[in-house]
Image (tube, rainbow, N blue to C red):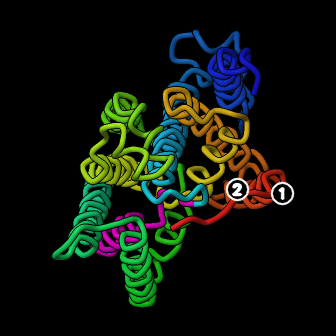
């Protein structure tokens, strides 16, 4: 990438975000004339401020959380194909949310149960992977994959035992759904809490991505940095899953695509991923609302349909990509 592109990347992504938000706010089964937006108590104003704007804000926040978590997971595992869900955090959150749904809990308790499940999964992976000795990316990945399989079996059991009346809601949540979105204030706080320390460690992340030996030679405490990365990525993933359920491919495609564009310095990659991930999910959610209007699709279905071919294109363009231990 030439020298001019890094300076233009963030402004370009910000412009795309603003354009996608404008389209999201004006699109839907009820058309809105921009001139009506500022009329007191108008139908258009209520639709925008009470429904579409909170949903678009939640979509941006969730996409940004997943994209930043994807960057951190890929550094942690030294694998450009890693994504935020690979270590079982989403499985724990899903089990917690399904238990809350089966108990008839309200939205606040649902979010609390999902977050508690995600934190439990994080604690289990961290404890089991560490064991009595030090842990490495391979051991962490294996532990996470096994735990994710266990959560998956428990999810299937809960779905088979759940009441028929609540099964549709459970499935929609598992597929990723923004239909019940509210203002994501705490999600934005979680994004700031994860992004700020990650940016502060961006130089160390650059070194760790090049390997432990290079990082250690330049004074980076790899074990401590890995622990911080894992905790931050888990916080971001848990917050995203709690907000909108399981939404795939954002944390995989966005960081990988930006790296192919040349954004390899984490001082640029982290904020660029937040903007690009948020924009991508806003666009996907707009399509989910409007493609079959007035019916709405789970946004997780749209991200998978968009993410699979997009990732295959990215993979084809980067033939040298390899899985590393």
Crowding at dot 2, Cα within 10 Å, few <14 / some 14-19 / many 20+, comes out as many
> For the N terminus, which image quadrant?
top right
Q: Is residue 228 above or below residue 5?
A: below
Q: Which of the 4 quarters of the picture holds residue 175?
A: bottom right
Q: Is residue 243 above or below residue 51?
A: below
Q: Secondary structure under badge 2?
A: helix
Q: Is residue 234 above or below residue 12?
A: below
Name the main secondary structure of what is drawn in magenta. helix
Q: What residue is at 53 percent from the left and 49 percent from the top?
A: 178
Provide the residue designation for mark 2: 302
Looking at marks 1 and 2 on the same chain, the residue that comes earlier in the sequence is marked by 2
Percent coordinates x, y for residue 248 in the rendering: 58, 59
Residue in front for this viewpoint, 245 or 43: 245
Q: Is residue 325 visible?
A: yes
Percent coordinates x, y for residue 149 in the rendering: 44, 82
Residue 300 covered by magenta stretch: no
Taking the image as shown, residue 52 lies to the left or right of residue 5, namely: left
Q: What residue is at 49 percent from the left and 47 percent from the top?
A: 209
* Range shown magenta: 82-104
Taking the image as shown, residue 168 lies to the left or right of residue 203, namely: right
Q: Is residue 188 visible?
A: no
Provide the residue designation for mark 1: 316
Q: What residue is at 40 percent from the left and 89 percent from the top?
A: 157
Percent coordinates x, y for residue 266 in the rendering: 50, 33
- 1 or 2: mark nearer the eye: 1
Residue 103 covered by magenta stretch: yes
Residue in front for this viewpoint, 123 or 188: 123
Give the CA distance from mark 1 to mark 2.
22 Å
Q: What residue is at 79 percent from the left and 49 percent from the top?
A: 291
């Amino acid at each position: 990438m030439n020298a001019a592109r890094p300076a233009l990347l963030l402004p370009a992504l910000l412009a795309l975000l603003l354009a996608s938000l404008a389209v999201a706010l004006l699109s839907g089964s009820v058309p809105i004339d921009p001139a009506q937006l500022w009329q007191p108590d108008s139908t258009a104003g209520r639709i925008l401020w009470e429904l579409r704007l909170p949903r678009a804000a939640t979509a941006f926040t969730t996409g940004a959380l997943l994209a930043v978590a994807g960057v951190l997971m890929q550094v942690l595992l030294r694998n450009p194909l890693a994504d935020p869900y690979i270590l079982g955090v989403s499985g724990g959150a899903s089990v917690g949310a399904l238990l809350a749904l089966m108990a008839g809990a309200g939205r606040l308790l649902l979010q609390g149960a999902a977050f508690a499940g995600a934190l439990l999964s994080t604690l289990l992976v961290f404890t089991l992977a560490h064991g009595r000795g030090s842990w490495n990316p391979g051991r962490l990945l294996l532990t996470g994959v096994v735990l994710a399989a266990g959560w998956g079996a428990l999810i299937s059991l809960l779905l088979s035992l759940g009441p028929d009346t609540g099964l549709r809601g459970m499935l929609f949540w598992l597929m990723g759904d923004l239909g019940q979105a509210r203002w994501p204030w705490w999600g934005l706080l979680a994004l700031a809490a994860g992004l700020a320390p990650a940016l502060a460690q961006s130089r160390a992340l650059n070194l760790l991505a090049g390997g432990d030996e290079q990082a250690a030679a330049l004074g980076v405490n790899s074990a401590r940095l890995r622990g911080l990365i894992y905790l931050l990525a888990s916080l971001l993933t848990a917050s995203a899953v709690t907000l909108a359920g399981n939404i795939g491919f954002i944390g995989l495609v966005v960081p990988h695509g930006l790296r192919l564009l040349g954004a390899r310095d984490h001082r640029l990659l982290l904020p660029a991923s937040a903007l690009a991930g948020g924009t991508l999910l806003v666009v996907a959610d707009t399509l989910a609302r409007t493609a079959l209007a007035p019916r709405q699709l789970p946004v997780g279905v749209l991200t998978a349909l968009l993410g699979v071919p997009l990732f295959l294109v990215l993979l084809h363009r980067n033939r040298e990509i390899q899985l590393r231990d």
